[in-house]
Amino acid sequence: MDGDTNRTRRTFLTGTGTLAVGALAGCLGGQGGPAGGNGSGETNGTGNESGEGENETAGGSETPYTVSMAPVGEVEFEAVPETFAAYEPGYADMAVALGRGDGLLSVGLKERYYTDVYDELDGVSVDTDSLTALVDNGIDREVFYELGADLHLMDPQWLVNNGSFGLEQSDIDAVADQVAPFFGNTIFRRTDEWHDYEYYTLYEAFGKVAEVFQEGERYEAFAAVHDAMLEEVEANLPGEDERPNALLTYAAADEPEEFSPYRVSGEGTNKKQFHDLGIDDALEGTGISGLSTTERGTIDYETMLEVDPDSILVRGHETKTEEEFRETVLAYMQQDSVASELTAVQEERVFRGGPIYAGPIHNLFLTERFAGLYYPDAFSGELFDRSEVSDVVTGTF
């Protein structure tokens, strides 16, 4: 499944009777995704001029529809998928936002799917105990046969190009032909050399998933919440000369000595909240590259001190509260002879870095969280209405 068009036909099981679904007429605009813009690099709105339709004929049978996304190209669906397997929790979160969370069968790593944000949304939950953790169970061809999903909501090239998975293109082709198609694009980062095909922003990919699940109205309603929040953020951000830079890293230990660097300036979806909040990249011009499949370099406190960032973001601690993080990681840095010289440590601007994989629900909470941490004088309290999000997910909007 390279960049060429790959049409996959599969009859998805939809239970007894017929399934009436809303059909999006054509693409959602942009790069096959949502149209419009907000100045942050994200695009919003579906560009769906004809509105919702019915994806069934007068005789009651399903009408096939196609959705296109790199790298798999055009995929034809004979019915809306009821069950799906995901690797990136960001894609799982997209499906939850579209009211399709009950069909989720898997994620790559359960510990990287942070579902605690759903606790703040009435009627929204995911039974993570029932999910298959693909990495824990070994990602081979057999696990996809065992899952028996109607759709594999993941980038097949991510699976093929991670040597630890042991999958080859022939495995992907067999699963797509005998079980269900793959549909997804690795969007959480943009540093992998093998990813030589089109990338998508969070909301472009979200729009594609909405097309697959035929949930155009829910997508539009969710995008409206997102746009309203960004309008408030942009209206209250301090001037550019008052915005700090950040060194984004990964180090899961409570007493970290080495850190894997990310680039805040990168366009991966896990940096969206930092871009929207005007946070600059502390590594700009340093020659230090970000994490990728092949680049696994680390930096230490001496290198950090050469950069001396305004703030430090440390990933790998999302299960901690901000207070717990300060009492472990920050406290250790304050006692270290080199780390304690860092401006960010002295000014206590060392924060949890947020999840590696984030979907649209995650992103709302992350933007709110970092707005309060970085600009406490401008932002406090909630930046979006939880009930509006709950209504979208539960279908009562």
Image: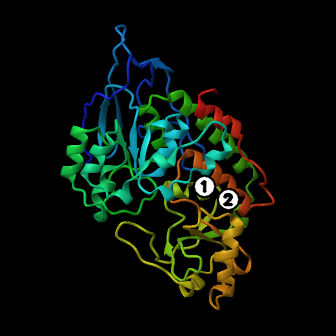
Q: Residues within 10 Å of mark 2 (few under 14, many from 20)?
A: many
Residue 265: give x, y in percent of width and height: 53, 63
Residue 71: give x, y in percent of width and height: 31, 46
Name which quarter of the figure residue 118 lies in. Answer: top right
Kindly identify the residue that appears in the image at 49 percent across and 81 percent down. 299
376 on left or right of 283: right
Residue 241: give x, y in percent of width and height: 71, 66
Q: Residue furthest front?
A: 129
Q: Label for residue 42?
A: none
Kindly identify the residue that appears in the image at 68 percent across and 69 percent down. 324
Q: Quadrant location of the C terminus?
A: top right
Residue annotated with mark 1: 273
Q: Are marks 1 and 2 in contact (CB under 8 Å)?
A: yes
Is 208 in front, or is 354? Answer: 354
Q: Residues within 10 Å of mark 1 (few under 14, many from 20)?
A: many
- Disc 2 secondary structure class: helix
What is the three-letter code of the residue carrying label 1?
Gln
Is 42 in front, or is 320? Answer: 320
Q: Residue furthest bottom?
A: 337
What is the three-letter code of the residue carrying label 2?
Phe
Residue 148: give x, y in percent of width and height: 31, 39
